[in-house]
Image: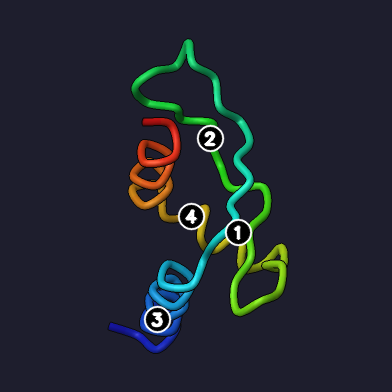
Amino acid sequence: MNEEVEKLEETIEYLKEGIYDIIWGGIDHKDYPDFCDAHIESAYIDGRPMDWNELDIINSDSEYIHEMLMLHLY
């Protein structure tokens, strides 16, 4: 595995562990159960708002986004 991929995976794990106060966007209930357009619009980590780069990284993990959205909705 190359260093870039390892660093990205470490960053995703770090973000997953500390994310809170999530604001969701793109939720279309007609798209149940896929919610393919759902994404995190904003959230906090380490007492500060996540920046756009962090949001892009966490939103790239579609499995995690779907899992967290299901917890949020149900």
Q: CA distance from mark 3 to mark 1?
A: 15 Å
**Disc 4 residue type (three-letter):** Ser
User: For mark 1, does the 10 Å Cα neighbourhood hold few (<14), some (14 to 19), or many (20 or more) residues?
Assistant: some
Mark number for residue 72? Answer: none
Ranked by sequence position, the earlier of labels 3 and 4 is 3
Which corner quadrant of the image does residue 2 belong to?
A: bottom left
Q: CA distance from mark 2 to mark 1?
A: 13 Å
Q: Which residue is mark 2?
A: 38
Q: Which residue is mark 4?
A: 60
Q: Position of residue 24 (x, y in %)?
A: 60, 40
Q: CB of mark 3 within 8 Å of CB of mark 1?
A: no
Q: CB of mark 3 within 8 Å of CB of mark 4?
A: no
**Helix, strand or loop at disc 1?**
helix
Q: Is residue 21 above or below residue 48?
A: above
Ranked by sequence position, the earlier of labels 2 and 4 is 2
Mark number for residue 10? Answer: 3
Q: Kindly report which numbered mark, 2 or 1, lies closer to the viewer in this rendering.
A: 2
Which corner quadrant of the image does residue 34 belong to?
A: top left
Identified at 67% across, 47% down, the residue is: 41
Ranked by sequence position, the earlier of labels 2 and 1 is 2
**Disc 2 residue type (three-letter):** Ala
Q: Is residue 1 left or right of residue 35?
A: left
Q: Which residue is mark 1?
A: 56
**Disc 1 residue type (three-letter):** Asp
Outermost residue on the top side: it is 30
